[in-house]
């Protein structure tokens, strides 16, 4: 017989991947938690986690069971909320840029009905996949096969410079126009930096790295201080001059959700509001 009563405890363990922390949160002993997880593994017929060095990692079966447990918990919470005349919050995952420049109006209207995760692109996909977020918003270069996507908006990539900069009056520029310039760049591991460096090497020119900064607000601040120029997505709002870079690909933002998620009217309503706000309906 499947021990369904152990699913809430397993969900806490799956999110913590630490028996000590999970047992403390559940207010039970570690041996009791081990028993619950072991009984679930026996019912599934496969290990639910493995140990990699000092880390615990869910197996594919463990990840699937965690998703099932989270969906079941969500359904129960939604039922109880509706029974009590309440509306349960929708979890939304997005990056700093999306929150600052795309989603502000929707969040201001719906903040009481939202639970927000600030996440990178990879983290957003993970949060949506495992059910911790019902909806994600992110730039996607490739569309995931296992998730549904809705294109929200597409923006040029632009060079941001002070209005007295020699390139500020141009209608558009190309990457080689940045030859020898002092640049405010994202950190090396960031997707934009990787893309820029790859294209720069293909175009065979050099620039000077004036500073590496995390996040568009700090990059724009350095530009305002005269440290250098920066490349950002065209959705960024600033009083600085923005010049489109024609040989950089446009940046598409997508809403991301698991198949069937729009059957939940809360998710469908939030997605419709985001689309309407960005003019993608």
Image: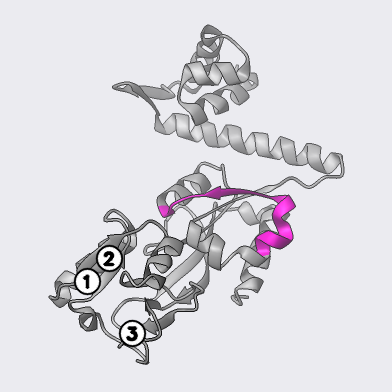
Taking depth in this image into account, of 189 and 187 the one nearest to the observer is 187
Point out the image quarter for the N terminus.
top right
Q: In the image, residue 220 lies at what x, y percent?
A: 42, 68
Up-down relation of residue 213 to residue 62 (above or below):
below
Taking depth in this image into account, of 46 and 32 the one nearest to the observer is 32
Based on the displayed image, in which of its 4 quarters is residue 277 positioned? bottom right
Highlighted magenta segment, given as a residue range = 106-121
Point out the image quarter for the C terminus.
bottom right
Q: Secondary structure at mark 2?
A: helix
Residue occupying the far left of the picture: 204
> Foreground mark, 1 or 3?
3
Up-down relation of residue 47 to residue 227 (above or below):
above
Between the C-alphas of marks 3 and 2, the distance is 24 Å
The numbered disc on residue 199 is: 1
Q: Within the magenta stretch, is there residue 195?
A: no
> Foreground mark, 3 or 2?
3
Q: In the image, residue 82 lies at what x, y percent?
A: 82, 43
Q: Secondary structure at mark 1?
A: helix
- Image position of 188 (left or right of 274): left
Mark found first going from the N terminus, 1 or 3: 3
Mark found first going from the N terminus, 3 or 2: 3
Based on the displayed image, in which of its 4 quarters is residue 61 positioned? top left
Between the C-alphas of marks 1 and 3, the distance is 23 Å
Neighbor class of circle 3 (other Cα within 10 Å; few <14, some 14-19, many 20+) is: few
């Amino acid at each position: 017989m499947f021990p369904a009563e152990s699913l809430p405890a397993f969900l806490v363990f799956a999110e913590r991947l630490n028996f000590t922390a999970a047992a403390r949160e559940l207010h039970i002993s570690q041996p009791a938690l081990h028993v619950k997880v072991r009984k679930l593994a026996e019912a599934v017929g496969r290990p639910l986690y493995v140990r990699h060095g000092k880390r615990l990692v869910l197996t594919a079966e463990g990840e699937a069971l965690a998703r099932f447990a989270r969906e079941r918990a969500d359904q129960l919470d939604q039922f109880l909320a509706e029974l009590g005349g309440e509306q349960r919050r929708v979890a939304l995952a997005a990056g700093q840029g999306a929150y600052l420049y795309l989603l502000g109006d929707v969040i201001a209207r719906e903040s009481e009905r939202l639970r927000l995760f600030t996440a990178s692109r990879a983290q957003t996909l993970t949060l949506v996949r495992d059910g911790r977020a019902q909806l994600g918003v992110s730039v996607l270069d490739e569309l995931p096969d296992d998730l549904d996507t809705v294109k929200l908006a597409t923006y040029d990539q632009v060079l941001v410079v002070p209005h007295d900069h020699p390139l500020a009056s141009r209608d558009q520029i190309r990457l080689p126009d940045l030859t020898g310039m002092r640049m405010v760049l994202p950190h090396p591991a960031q997707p934009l930096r990787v893309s820029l460096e790859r294209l720069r090497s293909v175009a065979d020119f050099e620039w000077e790295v004036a500073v590496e900064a995390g996040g568009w607000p700090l990059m724009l601040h350095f530009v305002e201080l005269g440290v250098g120029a920066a490349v950002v997505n065209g959705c960024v709002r600033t009083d600085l001059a923005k010049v489109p870079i024609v040989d950089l690909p446009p940046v598409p933002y997508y809403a991301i959700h698991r198949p069937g998620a729009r059957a939940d009217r809360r998710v469908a309503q939030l997605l419709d509001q985001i689309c309407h706000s960005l003019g993608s309906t």
